[in-house]
Image (cartoon, rainbow, N blue to C red):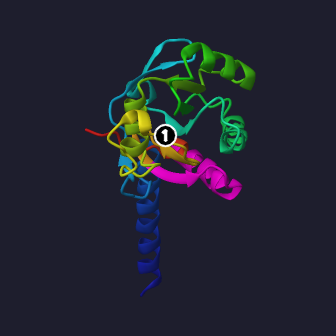
Amino acid sequence: MSKKGWVYLGFFGGLIGLFYFALTQLIPGFSTPKVTPVSYVRPFQFRNQDGQPVTEKDFLGKVYVTEFFFTTCKGICPRMNNNMRSVYEAFENEPNFKILSHTCDPDTDSVPQLKKYSDSMQVDTRRWVFVTGRKDSLYTAARVSYTIDDPANNPANIEDDFLHTQFWALVDQNGDVRKVIDGLKPSEVKELIESARNLLRNPPLKKS
């Protein structure tokens, strides 16, 4: 190829690169790899630690991590929420990130009990939200929406059911579950933080 030809090739290559860069800046999600979501969040309505209604619409446009715990747990929950605090601190000043903690023991974890617990955690409950509600609705969210527990773990009598899982779900701005991790493993918690940062930098295209 002649020198002139190489000049033209370099010129048009630069134009293509510039055009691609412009697309990544102007179109959210353009450069985000197309990954099939694990699941998606179904409609829900719970009550938070202040007794206010909370629905899936409150989280649209946000990246959030969700978990299930109970306030009187002496086993894995304190360790989980200690790890969750590192997630909270990583995004404490990020308005487009939240944490959603559901109780798996709503008979004990009333609104006042969740308020007492959230106060003891000393966190901003606009960023880290604690919710309670009907047991069947909570468990359906865990098993169907967030897929952090096997749907087969569902006895005929809801009173005989008890969910106790260390798994968390990372949800994107569209309400799609992008990742499920073990909240007891610091290495997986680190990966989740990086994945959340990537989603905040490169949000997916909005669903039509």
Q: Which residues are magenta?
A: 178-199
Q: Quadrant of the C terminus?
A: top left
**Can residue 204 be seen in this snapshot?**
no
How many numbered badges does the structure rendering display? Answer: 1
Taken as a whole, is the magenta stretch helix, strand or loop? helix
User: Measuring 60% from the left and 13% from the top, which residue is drawn there?
Assistant: 112
Does 134 sit left or right of 77 as displayed? Answer: left
Furthest-bottom residue in this view: 1
Displayed quadrant of residue 73: top right
**Can residue 6 be seen in this snapshot?**
yes
> Which percent across, then down, holds residue 6?
45, 79
Secondary structure of the residue carrying numbered label 1:
loop
**Type of amino acid at the residue the image marks with label 1:** Phe
Query: Quick check: 29 above or below 109?
Result: below
Query: Quick check: 152 above or below 106?
Result: below
Q: Quadrant of the N terminus?
A: bottom left
User: Measuring 57% from the left and 23% from the top, which residue is drawn there?
Assistant: 109
User: Measuring 52% from the left and 24% from the top, which residue is drawn there?
Assistant: 131
> Which percent across, then down, holds residue 129?
57, 25
Query: To which residue does mark 1 refer?
Result: 162
Crowd rating for badge 1 (residues with CA inside 10 Å; few <14, some 14–19, many 20+): some
Displayed quadrant of residue 114: top right
Q: Is residue 183 magenta?
A: yes
Using the image as rendered, state which of residue 26 and residue 152 is in the foreground. Answer: 152
> Which percent across, then down, holds residue 70?
60, 32
Does 24 sit left or right of 40 as displayed? Answer: right
Q: Is residue 101 magenta?
A: no
Displayed quadrant of residue 126: top right
Using the image as rendered, state which of residue 159 and residue 168 is in the foreground. Answer: 159
User: Measuring 62% from the left and 51% from the top, which residue is drawn there?
Assistant: 194
> Which percent across, then down, holds residue 119?
71, 18
